[in-house]
Image (cartoon, rainbow, N blue to C red):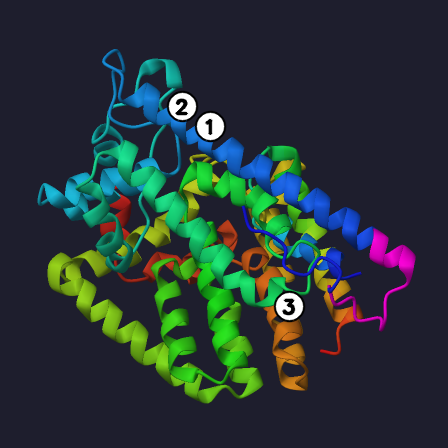
Amino acid sequence: MTALWLLPVFVPFLRDPPLVAILAAPLGTVMLGFVVWRSRV
Amino acid sequence: MIQSKSPGGADLNVGRPSPETSRGIAVLTRISGILAALSVLGLVVYFGAAVFVMTSEIYKGDVFPADYIAFWASGQLALDGRAIEAFDTATITTAVTIPAEYDPKQYYWMYPPTWAAVTTPLGALPFWVAWPLFSAATVVLYITAIGRWAGRLPGEQNLLLAAPVVVLGAMNGNTGLLLAGLLILALSAMERERWVAAGLLIAAMTVKPTLGVLIPVALIAGGYWRVVLWATVGTIVFALLAAIPFGFEYWARFFAEILIAADRLAEGGIPTEVMVTWYGFGRALGAGHDAAILGQIGFSVVAVGLIGWGWRRGGRLAEKGALLLIATPLARLTRIITRWPSRWRGLSCGSMPGMDSAAASKP
């Protein structure tokens, strides 16, 4: 599960290639929800 | 390459790992090492080839395709006593020479003098030295910053080093790794209750104020008043120090320029496919500028609420920090707040200071 925490690092700053960049905002938002769900924030 | 010190000791937050889990961690650790090695090798080959090409006698140019070109060009202009002319797109674009085969593009400079104070000394070096040097420094800063928390990951920093963003960020020589590193270092300092260091690190992030939307929200909601204080003091001091060589007119021009940045965006002057925001997503799907802005504003309002709620509730700083790290690049508003949907425009930027002079100088 901890490995999944890598995804926020991989995704939000990704800028190239464009297809991946387009997916960055939805994936980043999903990861935001994941952090809220998994953490004790 | 960074070696893993404790491949079986990763913290999965699930108690003692089963043999299958331990085997999985060991496999992931090994893969992370291979990926990190490939990333480092790829960067060495890329920069080595670029430097080889640039230093050859037949190379007809002084720069190589990378985001760093704008930084280096601004340094050239500053060293020539024309620092403020970097804001003029035609001037900064012609300040460097790039071979026609590389499909030369326009370069934009929308940075405060605090960042010019960084790029100017590097401009004294040849591009083939300054660009790898800057990229290497940002990678080292980023990996160092994340190191404190990477011990919980299989292979520690290896997967982070292999992340596409690190490789692409280093190749381009942009500010992504630097700013991510500064924010992580600031969060790490807060975890150790080093408030002054945290505040000054956040103040240093103002070289790219684009990303500053959520950080004050988080600090205030969490009651980190000493960090707020030192970040404010640091920002003011850095701003004044930068004004000594560059002058306060540089600051005025900067604020004027960011007001027209969104106009360039609306007119297609800046590629939207490289934006990681919901604005970029909307434009990529064919939405208009105004509709995409509304989507971005909507997400940003939710992000502000989420960060405020998360940081106010408490919890571990690493978890609150993860929220902030993910949300910060997604909620950037700089190119958005300066250009409201057209029907509101007369109520907003039309009367903002510097707008007229900035528009007049627009290329």
The quadrant of the picture occupied by the N terminus of chain B is: top right
Q: Name the one closer to the observer, B274 or B23.
A: B23
The local crowd at label 2, few if under 14, some if 14 to 19, many if 20 or more residues have their Cα within 10 Å, is few
Residue contact between numbered discs 3 and 2, judged by CB atoms under 8 Å: no
Look at the image and give the residue range highlighted in magenta: B10-23
The residue labelled by disc 2 is: B49
First of labels 1, 3 by sequence position: 1
Residue sitting nearer the eye, B40 or B310: B40
Question: Where residue B121 sits: x, y (%)?
Answer: 19, 49
Residue occupying the point 42% across, 88% down: B226
Badge 2 amino acid: Ala
Q: Tell me the residue at 66%/73% (across/down).
A: B319
Kindly identify which numbered label has been placed on residue B323. Answer: 3
Residue furthest top as drawn: B58
Secondary structure type for disc 3: helix
Q: Viewed as shown, does residue B306 lie left or right of B272?
A: right
Q: Which residue is mark 1?
A: B45
Kind of residue indicated by mark 3: Leu
Crowd class of label 1 (few under 14; some 14 to 19; many from 20; radius 10 Å): few
Dot 1 and dot 2 within a common chain = yes
Quadrant position of residue B206: bottom left
Quarter of the image with the C terminus of chain B is top left
Coordinates of residue B120 in the picture (x, y in percent): 20, 48
**B298 to B83, vertically: above or below:** below
Main SS of the magenta segment?
loop
Q: Same chain for marks 3 and 2?
A: yes
In this view of the protein, which residue sits in the foreground, B26 or B242?
Answer: B26
